[in-house]
Image (spheres, rainbow, N blue to C red):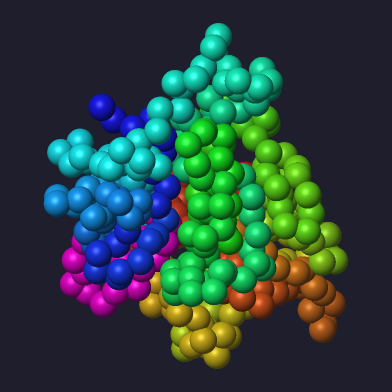
Amino acid sequence: MPTKTRITHAYCVQLNKELSITDARREFFSLEEPRTRFEFLCATPACRELAVNAKITAVNYDKQPNDTYRAAHFRQNEKYAHAPDCEWMLDEDADEVDGKLPGESATDAFVRRAKRKLHDYVDVFAPDVEPASGGSEGSVAAGANPAVERAGRGAKPGRNHSSRSLERLVEYYRQARKELSEDEFKALKLRVAGEGEMPLSWYFKNVAYAKLRPLNRVIHGGAMLVDRYGAGFKLKFYDRLDGKPVFLYVSKEQMGEYRFRGYLDGLLRGEDVDYFRVFALGELALSPSGKSINLQVDDLNKLVLLPGHKQASGAEPASEKQG
């Protein structure tokens, strides 16, 4: 019987570590071509100790988000059995009475059922929290921290899903906006380290509505590639702020220090890419000339670029202006 618990992490045989599906995509596209798909096993150690290891199916991690309608995700491979205590084989509905779990409010039940429609979700976002000692490279560079994630896992549903990965948070945000109703989307909450709890939508600020001051928010908007500086690059946002153009500049030195520079460079070199949807944790600052504004990102792990295509009419991409 298929699991009702969303599988958010799996063990990658080739990389010898646990990954989220967004980590897997970055790792895959960082490989030199021709690339070979990874093999995934259940993240629960007991499932990998069985005589026949429990394999997990990874869907669409080898495609860019704009190349597929379905979001990348893990799912159970029903050909393989799991250990009795496997964290992903829990039936989240087993203790429901009249649609609610014991001690659960009607609002909490509504949110839980909404999240069940998604491939993954993030309850707690801590971008600047260092991974636990001995954490994998993936937990440092790609953002997933299995030690943090498992802290809330147990025999009961309602566990927290914590992450340091901006890309994973962006994937959650975008799928929720696409798949959920307006009421369901507005009900989603996010706890941010150092900020407290807020509606998920509040943590995302369109560049047109941002401010020239430090913001612990994900600044986003559509942008075009206007220049390359070796491995470095410059993007110009379609939206203006206070009547001024907004740019994002990344130097070749910053790219050279980034572990997933091959992945990011590949996105920028896409021949059929018309524009990029930018999501960044950074600071907006007035340029020295005062004629433009720069979005400064000090860590490329805090930058997500999603390649896209303009509409056939040639119009600029939708801004997704929300908050």
Reply yes or no: does residue 36 show up in magenta: yes
Q: Is residue 167 left or right of residue 240?
A: left
Measuring from the top left, give residue 94's x and y in whole percent.
Answer: 44, 21
Q: Is residue 27 above or below residue 63?
A: below
Q: Is residue 104 left or right of residue 34?
A: right
Q: Is residue 161 visible?
A: yes
Q: Is residue 237 visible?
A: no
Q: Is residue 152 left or right of residue 187?
A: left
The residue that appears at 25% across and 55% down in the rendered structure is 48
The residue that appears at 70% across and 68% down in the rendered structure is 282
Measuring from the top left, give residue 53's x and y in whole percent.
Answer: 19, 52
Q: Which quadrant would the C terminus be assigned to in this image?
A: top right
Say which quarter of the image contains residue 301: bottom right
Q: Is residue 254 above or below residue 19?
A: below
Q: Is residue 298 left or right of residue 91?
A: right
Q: How many marks?
A: 0
Q: Which quadrant would the N terminus be assigned to in this image?
A: top left
Residue, far top: 98
Taking depth in this image into account, of 228 and 50 the one nearest to the observer is 50
* Span shown in magenta: 21-37
Measuring from the top left, give residue 160's x and y in whole percent.
Answer: 58, 44
Say which quarter of the image contains residue 217: bottom right
The residue that appears at 65% across and 22% down in the rendered structure is 104
The residue that appears at 33% across and 55% down in the rendered structure is 45
Q: Is residue 301 above or below residue 165?
A: below
Reply yes or no: does residue 130 show up in magenta: no
Measuring from the top left, give residue 225's x and y in whole percent.
Answer: 52, 70
Taking depth in this image into account, of 312 and 1 the one nearest to the observer is 1
